[in-house]
Amino acid sequence: MANFNPFHQPIIGSRPIVLLSTGTAVTVTGTTTETILKTVLVPGGLVGKYGSIRLTCIFSYTNVANIKTWRVRLGGISGTAFITGAVTTTSNTLAARTITNRGSYSSQVCWVAGSTAAGSGGANNLITGTIDTSVDQNLVVTGQVANAADFVTIESCIVEVFPAD
């Protein structure tokens, strides 16, 4: 018997489910606190034991020497930061990563948060997590600036799930 997700579709691992696709810009400025720019509910069980969450986000930020940071966390604001970018003298970036369950609802792997290009390697090029995806989890995109006069803006964001059990 096929497993079913909350959207009443068989979990077959071949068709993505789009949870968010937006070009609505949201900005953080005036505070140095990590601030949620987007929240996406990932329904419990949707990803499956072997499924993936793929994110594609475009960020813009103040082109000055102060550090501007953006993160993607699974499990809300205190969850695992699977994607992190800390930038200074550039003005925009594209972040594209995949978070994959590793045969368990509560074991994830993602390419290192600070890597910049496919094929680039390093001593620590994986981020792992233990977020229980069998229950509803918030995926949050955040921004943070070192100087309250600077800004971080999420310009667009796509979140897709590739279910697989």
Image: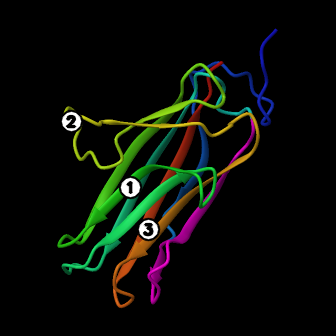
The main secondary structure of the magenta stretch is strand
Residue 146 lies, with reference to residue 125, above or below; the image says below
Q: Earlier in the sequence, mark 3 or mark 1?
A: 1
Residue 100 lies, with reference to residue 18, above or below; the image says above
Eye-nearest disc, 2 or 3: 2
Q: Amino acid at mark 3?
A: Ile
In the displayed structure image, the side of residue 123 where residue 135 appears, left or right:
right
Q: Earlier in the sequence, mark 2 or mark 3?
A: 2
Q: Which mark is residue 133?
A: none
- Residue 36: x and y, percent? 56, 69
Q: Amino acid at mark 2?
A: Gly
Residue at mark 3: 154
- Residue 58: x and y, percent? 37, 60
When asked about the image quadrant of residue 163, the answer is top right
- Residue 158: x and y, percent? 50, 51
Residue at mark 2: 122
Q: Tell whether position 36 is magenta.
A: yes
Span shown in magenta: 25-44
Q: Are marks 2 and 3 in contact (CB under 8 Å)?
A: no
Residue at mark 1: 84
Q: Quadrant of the image for the N terminus?
A: top right
Q: Tell whether position 41 is magenta.
A: yes
**Label 1: which secondary element:** strand
Residue at the spot 42% in from the left edge and 68% down from the top edge: 155
Is the image coloured rainbow, by chain, by secondary structure, or in one colour? rainbow
Eye-nearest disc, 1 or 2: 2
Q: Amino acid at mark 1?
A: Thr
**Label 3: which secondary element:** strand
Eye-nearest disc, 3 or 1: 1
Could you say which is closer to the camera, residue 18 or residue 63? Answer: 63
Q: Earlier in the sequence, mark 1 or mark 2?
A: 1
